[in-house]
Image (tube, coloured by chain):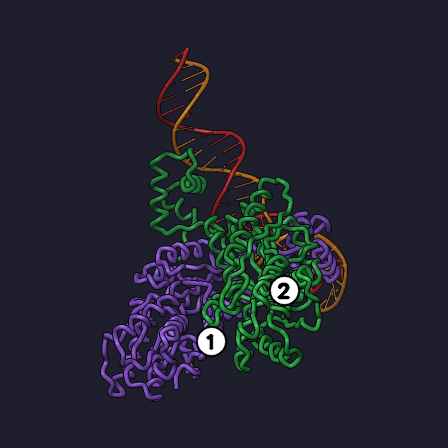
Chain colours: A green, B purple, C red, D orange
DNA sequence: TTAACAATCGAAAACGTTTTCGGTAATTTC
DNA sequence: GAAATTACCGAAAACGTTTTCGATTGTTAA
C-alpha cells in the first residue's frame, strides 16, 4: 500500500488530474458534487500531497534550516523550542544541524541546507568562525538569513541578540552595589562577540564606579564541553593568585557553578567571602544552593523572534519586495539569588 | 543571482542537460574534457542539485523525522545529538518536532512528516498517547519507524530502549543494600510504559528482599514541566504521611532534586535520614550537593542506535527486502554518589 | 572496403504537482 | 430562437532531475 497520488484518485473517479487537484484546493470552478466525491476518496485513500512535487512546482519547501553550535545546552535547546514552536504555527518545518563549534562543519552544513533548498536559515556561529565568506554567499544568493546570539557584526543580515555589554554592566554593577571591592571576571574565549562584549561591560562598570581595571583579575576559559571543570580550575587558580577578591562576574552559569563547587570544597563561603554572578539563567542555577544570581538570557523568546524575523524576510522575498536587515535586541534582567548579598 | 540549474550549465557549454548531469555524476560515457569543463563551470556557478527534483525523481529525501515530547530536557537533547550526528554521517538530515506530550499534536506531526515524504521516522511517544492507530498507519504504509524510550509494546516496529524494570530493581536494591528499611517510590504518570516498568522493578526488588509492598508509599507525579515542583510537593506530603521512610527511589532526577531541596529546607539530612536514588543521570545531578545517586540513561547512545536501526530499515526497504522489527536494549548503570550511604 | 565496435553525446520519458487557457454543455437573456 | 453568459471540466506546460535507449561519430578488425 503505497501513498496515493492525484492520478490514483483521478482514475478511480474518471476525472482528470487537474480537476482532482482543483477540487482538493478549493478552486471555485468545480461542482460541489465532484468536490465532495474527490475529498471523500482522498481521505479514505489517506492522500497526502507529495511534498517533493509541490516544492518543485512552487519553489518553496516550507522548511527552514537551523545551525547551532551545541544542542545539549539549556540556552540553545530553549532557542530550538522557540523556533520550532513558532515555525509550526506558520506551517514550517525545521531542520536542525549542530556545528560542534567547528567552522568547517558550519560551512558544509550551510551547503547542505542550500542544496536542500530550505526557505531560510537561522544560525548561531561556531566559536571558531572568524571568516564570513560562507555567510555572504548565502546572502548573495538572496536566501533569507537570520543570526542570533553568536553573531558577526559585519555580516549584513538580520540579527537577534541581547545587549551583552549592558547585561554584563548590570551584573558587575550589582556586585559593586552589594559591597564588593575587588571584582574578578571569568570570561569566554577571545573570539565570539558576546564574550568580548561581556568583558567590555564588566570593564566599563568598573571604570564608571572609579574602580581600577586589573587585567590579572580576568581569567579566560573556552566555555566548551568542559565548562564546569574550567570553572573549578579558574577558581582554584584565583585563590592561589589573589586573596582579596570578593566578587566575580562569570561568563556562563555552568562555569560559575563549577567555581562555586570549588569554593565550597575549599571552605570559601558564598556570598560571605565571595559573591558570584553568572550569565544565562540556566534552570540549574535556581536549584543549586546557594542559588546563583545571574543574568536571564531569554532563549525561547530569541528563538521565537528569530523565526518571526526570518518569516518576514521569506514573505518579502516572495513578493519581490526589498528587505533591509534589522537587528532585534531583547531585554535581559538580573535575577537575584543567594550567591550575592 | 539565483541558483544555477543543469540547464544553465548546459546552455553555457552548448551541451545537453543529459550530458551535464552525467558528467557531474561520473558516468563513464562522457569524455574527460567535457567532464572537466562541466565540473569547473558547476563550481564557479556554485551549482547545487535541486533537492526537490532529485527527491521527486529518486523517491527519497535523505531526510528523516524525529518526534519527541520535549526538547529542553537533558535526556532528549542528548538523544537528538546522537541522532543528528549519526544521520549526518550517512548524509541524512533530521526534521525535529516537539509533541509537547500531546497525543493530538503527535498525530498531526506524523501526518506532516508523511506528506513531507521523509525516508523514516523516529519517535518517543507523548505521555498522553494511549491509542496507536496513527503509528500503525505509518507501518501499514511501509514507512520505516523506530520508537525509543517511551514506546508502545504492542506496536510492531523496531524499538530502542533500556530495561527500565531491571534498572529500577537495581536502584531499589542499592537502597536496600545500603541499609534502608522502608523505601518509598515517586513514580511517573500511569500511562507511559517506563513509569510502569520502573514501578514494577521497584516492587519486585522489595518482594525479592522480603520487604512488604505498601501502596501508600508510592507517590505519583506527572513529570511534566513542573517536575521540580512536584518533587517538592511529594516530599512535603511524604513527611506528613510517614515518619519512618528512610529511602526513596524517584522516577526522574529532576523530581529527585525537587525532593532533595524540600528535605534540606525542612532539615531532613541526606543520606543520613533519607537516602535518595534518581533516574536518568542528568548532568545537574553530578553538580548539586550532595551528588545524586542515579541510574545512567544513555541518551546519546540511544539516539545513535535508533538512527542505525532506522537506517537499516531504510536500506532494506530500498532493496525490497523484508524486515522484521528488532528491539535493542541498552545497558544502564547505577551511578553512586552522596545521596545514598 | 565493409562490418563491427568503441566513444561520445542527446532525445525523451518520468517523478507528482500547480496553473493557465480553452472547450463544451447548460443556462440565462434579449 | 439566437446570443450571451455561466458552470464545469481537461489538455498541456512547467518545475529540475535521472536514466533508458538510440544516434552519431570515429576507429579498428576482417
Query: Closer to the observer: label 1 or label 2?
Result: 1
Q: Is residue A218 left or right of residue A289?
A: right
| Viewer-side residue, B214 vs B232 | B232
Residue at image point 59% right, 55% down: A161
Q: Is residue B324 visible?
A: no
Quadrant of the rendered image containing residue B232: bottom left
Q: Classify mark 1: helix, strand or loop.
A: loop
Q: Is residue B201 left or right of residue A82?
A: left
Quadrant of the rendered image containing residue B266: bottom left
Q: Residues within 10 Å of mark 1 (few under 14, many from 20)?
A: some
Q: What x and y, as percent, mark residue B69?
A: 41, 63
Q: What x and y, as percent, mark residue B295?
A: 41, 79
Residue wearing tag 2: A126
Rendered position, A20 above or below D1: below
Name the chain under label 1: B
Q: Classify mark 2: helix, strand or loop.
A: loop
- In this figure, what is the number of numbered marks? 2
Residue at image point 38% right, 61% down: B101
Give a yes or no on whether discs 1 and 2 share a subunit: no
Name the chain under label 2: A
The residues bearing labels 1 and 2 have C-alpha atoms spaced at a distance of: 29 Å
Q: Is residue B43 left or right of residue A123?
A: right
Q: Is residue B51 visible?
A: yes
Q: What x and y, as percent, mark residue A193?
A: 66, 61
Residue wearing tag 1: B288
Q: What x and y, as percent, mark residue B136?
A: 34, 62
Q: Is residue A186 left or right of residue B237?
A: right
Amino acid at each position: 500500500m503505497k501513498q496515493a497520488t492525484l492520478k490514483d484518485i483521478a482514475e478511480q473517479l474518471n476525472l482528470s488530474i487537474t480537476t482532482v487537484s482543483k477540487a482538493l484546493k478549493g478552486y471555485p470552478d468545480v461542482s460541489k458534487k465532484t468536490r465532495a466525491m474527490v475529498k471523500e476518496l482522498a481521505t479514505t485513500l489517506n492522500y497526502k500531497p507529495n511534498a517533493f512535487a509541490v516544492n518543485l512546482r512552487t519553489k518553496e519547501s516550507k522548511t527552514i534550516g537551523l545551525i547551532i553550535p551545541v544542542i545539549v545546552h539549556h540556552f540553545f535547546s530553549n532557542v530550538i523550542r522557540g523556533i520550532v514552536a513558532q515555525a509550526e504555527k506558520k506551517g514550517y518545518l525545521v531542520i536542525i544541524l549542530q556545528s560542534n563549534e567547528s567552522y568547517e562543519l558550519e560551512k558544509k552544513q550551510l551547503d547542505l541546507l542550500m542544496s536542500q533548498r530550505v526557505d531560510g536559515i537561522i544560525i548561531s556561529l561556531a566559536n571558531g568562525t572568524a571568516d564570513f565568506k560562507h555567510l555572504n554567499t548565502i546572502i548573495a544568493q538572496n536566501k533569507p538569513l537570520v543570526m542570533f546570539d553568536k553573531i558577526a557584526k559585519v555580516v549584513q543580515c538580520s540579527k537577534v541578540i541581547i545587549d551583552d555589554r549592558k547585561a554584563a554592566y548590570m551584573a558587575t554593577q550589582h556586585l559593586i552595589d552589594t559591597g564588593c571591592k575587588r571584582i574578578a571576571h571569568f570570561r569566554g574565549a577571545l573570539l565570539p562577540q558576546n564574550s568580548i562584549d561581556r568583558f567590555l561591560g564588566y570593564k566599563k562598570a568598573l571604570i564608571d564606579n572609579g574602580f581600577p581595571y586589573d587585567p590579572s583579575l580576568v581569567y579566560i576559559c573556552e566555555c566548551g564541553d568542559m565548562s564546569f571543570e574550567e570553572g573549578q580550575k579558574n577558581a582554584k587558580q584565583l585563590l592561589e593568585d589573589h586573596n582579596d577578591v570578593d566578587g566575580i562576574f562569570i561568563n556562563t552559569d555552568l562555569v560559575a557553578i563549577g567555581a562555586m563547587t570549588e569554593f565550597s570544597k575549599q571552605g570559601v563561603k558564598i556570598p560571605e567571602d565571595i559573591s558570584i554572578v553568572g550569565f544565562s539563567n540556566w534552570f540549574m542555577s535556581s536549584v543549586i544552593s546557594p542559588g546563583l544570581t545571574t543574568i536571564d538570557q531569554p532563549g525561547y523568546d530569541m528563538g521565537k523572534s528569530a523565526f518571526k524575523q526570518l518569516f518576514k524576510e521569506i514573505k518579502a522575498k516572495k513578493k519581490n519586495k526589498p528587505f533591509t536587515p534589522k537587528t532585534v535586541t531583547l531585554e535581559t534582567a538580573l535575577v537575584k539569588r543567594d550567591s550575592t548579598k
